[in-house]
Image (tube, rainbow, N blue to C red):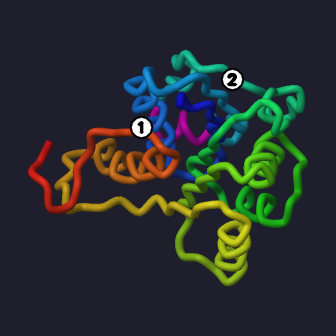
Amino acid sequence: MKHKMVIAISGASGSVYAKVLLDKLLTCNDQIAEVGIVMSANAKKVWETELGNQSYLNYPFRYFEKHDFNAPFASGSAKYNSMIVVPCSMGTLGRIASGVSDDLVTRAADVILKERRKLILMVRDTPYNLIHIRNMETVTLAGGIICPCSPSFYSKPENFESMAATVVDRALELTGFELNTYRWGSPDI
């Protein structure tokens, strides 16, 4: 089955994770039917600040405005099978956890959860307060997966992007992608 997925990019710090995810999707074209992207205005500003460019404009995926409720993935009938929010701000997490569907990101997350499909929230903030933890519990109980942007180091990443890839690969595999990536106990690839 080819993936129909939504990528939401919030204004949390960690644009490198979104960039690495979009780059990785370019290499998985044979596994993709469709990718829809929703990127907040803050996400664009953070990307430009952290990465020093507007390369988010260069990806061949379909972009949707934050309040475009005519986007196909605003309805379960479009059969998008997964959604990744990367990075996921605590505000976005809180709105998803409380069922507030006031924009396309939270509506798409609500649709993915109600249809029992894969919702991956790549939270980036630290430390967590009790509200964050309870929101993560709520989303988990509703069927979502919290995938913190906590890179692993046993693969000996050589730069920020390869470090971010240790988390991105994990998130993509959680949605069902087949990747050739580092495995604990296996020889380097």
Residue at 60% x, 56% y is 121
* Residue 63 disc label: 2
* Residue 75 disc label: none
* Residue 20 disc label: 1
For the residues labelled 2 and 1, the Cα–Cα distance comes to: 17 Å
Q: Residue furthest bottom?
A: 130
| Position in image of residue 80 (x %, y %) | 69, 35
Relative placement, left or right, of 166 versus 159 is right
Any magenta on residue 173? no
Residue at 88% x, 57% y is 100
Relative placement, left or right, of 71 versus 135 is right
Above or below 46: residue 148 = below
| Position in image of residue 37 (x %, y %) | 66, 30
Task: Please tell me whether mark 1 sits on a helix, a strand or a loop.
Answer: helix
Which residues are the magenta region?
A: 45-52
Residue at 57% x, 47% y is 86
Quarter that holds the C terminus = top left
Task: Please tell me whether mark 2 sits on a helix, a strand or a loop.
Answer: strand
Picture quadrant where residue 95 is located? bottom right
Compare residues 20 and 49 and report the one nearer the observer: 20
Compare residues 81 and 68 and report the one nearer the observer: 81
Q: Which amino acid is tagged 1? A: Val
Of labels 2 and 1, earlier in sequence is 1
Picture quadrant where residue 51 is located? top left
